[in-house]
């Protein structure tokens, strides 16, 4: 069945429904990255200080200069763009990518991809746990955001091919003064050949502030009740979840009228949910066109350009 949910009161969540990725075994990590902010020649500079990646994972970096005058007192630095890449251009059965990132105090960075994350056809699945590990493609990210850091997770959408099986887990730990903009989106695939023709897609994002769980967002798509995913999705060809957490980014969203821009778009289906104690906002978007969602993201969140160096999804 197709399910989408945002948790407003996480204390009511049953333990067995939570996705546990806290017990990371570092020896099993395909990647680890630390991003730090430091002073160089009187200016604050943000850059990776420690990085490790092994097949099939790779990190690429670019430095985006910001249109601001910096002094030693500025909390804002330049912005480092980090591209998360898998060799081969996508995932196949049995692929498992598990990595962790630490964004240090006052750092400014964007995590993105070079193209859509492609998930290819999986092999036969007989239903046992061992078969599940072999025939699902899995990506896990643990992200720690420290004090005064500003982080955007802006990947291209996931694209599942016919008979694909994919799981994605994102666990995020934030400091109370940090800020986060996260986009998680999915397309129907190749519309003329295999629209919504994959077997299973599951994405889980958990966000904690000072070790308190404030949001658990789950999206699961699979055939059920005699209906294919395509039948359940109707005319929708792309869906997106946008999560904003942090005082600075929420103030910017409100002052720029972001929600008004989104809900006035007649080409979108949209809804909004609030996290407890005004800690964040969860937006859900759906459209018959991936391009419509992309344009909406560009226009609605253009206010972050001064923090990341260019418009999102440009």
Image (tube, grey):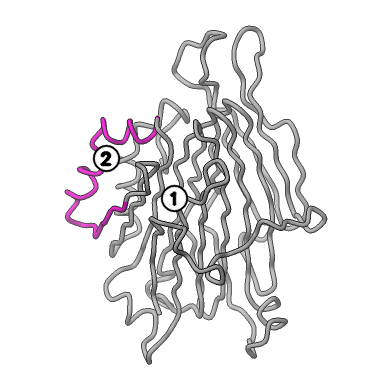
Q: Position of residue 119 (x, y in %)?
A: 56, 68
Q: Earlier in the sequence, mark 2 or mark 1?
A: 1
Mark carried by residue 258:
2
Kindly identify the residue that appears in the image at 23 percent across and 36 percent down. Answer: 257
Q: Position of residue 189 (x, y in %)?
A: 44, 69
Q: In this rendering, is residue 153 above or below 292?
A: above
Q: How many marks?
A: 2
Kindly identify the residue that appears in the image at 38 percent across and 90 percent down. Answer: 225
Q: Is residue 227 left or right of residue 62?
A: left
Q: In this rendering, is residue 167 above or below 274?
A: below
Pick the quarter of the image with the N terminus: bottom left
| Gap between marks 2 and 1 measured at Cα | 15 Å
Q: Residues within 10 Å of mark 1 (few under 14, many from 20)?
A: many
Q: Quadrant of residue 291?
A: bottom left
Q: Residues within 10 Å of mark 2 (few under 14, many from 20)?
A: some
Check disc 1 and report its element: helix, strand or loop. strand
Q: In this rendering, is residue 19 above or below 273?
A: below
Q: What's the magenta region?
A: 248-273
Kindly identify the residue that appears in the image at 20 percent across and 50 percent down. Answer: 263
Q: Quadrant of residue 149?
A: top right
The residue beneath circle 1 is: 183
Pick the quarter of the image with the C terminus: top left
Q: Is residue 166 magenta?
A: no
Q: Position of residue 10 (x, y in %)?
A: 45, 58
Mark carried by residue 19:
none
Check disc 2 and report its element: helix, strand or loop. helix
In this view, the residue farthest toward the right is: 27
């Amino acid at each position: 069945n197709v399910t989408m949910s945002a948790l407003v009161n996480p204390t009511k969540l049953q333990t067995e429904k939570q996705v546990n990725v806290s017990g990371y075994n570092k020896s099993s990590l395909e990647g680890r990255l630390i991003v730090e902010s430091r002073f160089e020649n009187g200016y604050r500079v943000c850059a990776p200080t420690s990085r490790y990646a092994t097949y099939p994972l790779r990190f690429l970096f670019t430095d985006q200069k910001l249109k601001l005058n910096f002094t030693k007192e500025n909390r804002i630095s330049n912005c480092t763009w980090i591209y998360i890449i898998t060799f081969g251009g996508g995932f196949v059965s049995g692929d498992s990518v598990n990595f962790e990132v630490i964004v240090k105090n006052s750092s400014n960075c964007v995590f993105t991809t070079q193209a859509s994350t492609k998930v290819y056809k999986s092999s036969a699945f007989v239903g046992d746990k061992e078969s599940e590990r072999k025939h699902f493609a899995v990506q896990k990210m643990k992200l720690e955001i420290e004090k005064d850091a500003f982080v955007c997770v802006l990947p291209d959408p996931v694209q599942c091919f016919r008979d694909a099986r994919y799981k994605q887990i994102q666990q995020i730990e934030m400091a109370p003064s940090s800020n986060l903009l996260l986009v998680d989106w999915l397309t129907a695939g190749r519309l003329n050949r295999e629209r919504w023709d994959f077997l299973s897609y599951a994405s889980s994002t958990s966000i904690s502030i000072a070790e308190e769980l404030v949001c658990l967002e789950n999206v699961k798509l699979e055939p059920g009740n005699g209906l294919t995913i395509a039948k359940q999705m109707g005319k929708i060809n792309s869906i997106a979840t946008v999560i904003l957490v942090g005082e600075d980014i929420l103030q910017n969203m409100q002052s720029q009228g972001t929600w008004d821009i989104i809900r006035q778009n007649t080409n979108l289906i949209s809804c909004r949910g609030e996290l407890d104690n005004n800690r964040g906002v969860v937006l859900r978007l759906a459209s018959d066109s991936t391009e419509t969602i992309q344009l909406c993201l560009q226009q609605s969140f253009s206010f972050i350009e001064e923090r990341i160096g260019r418009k999102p999804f440009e």
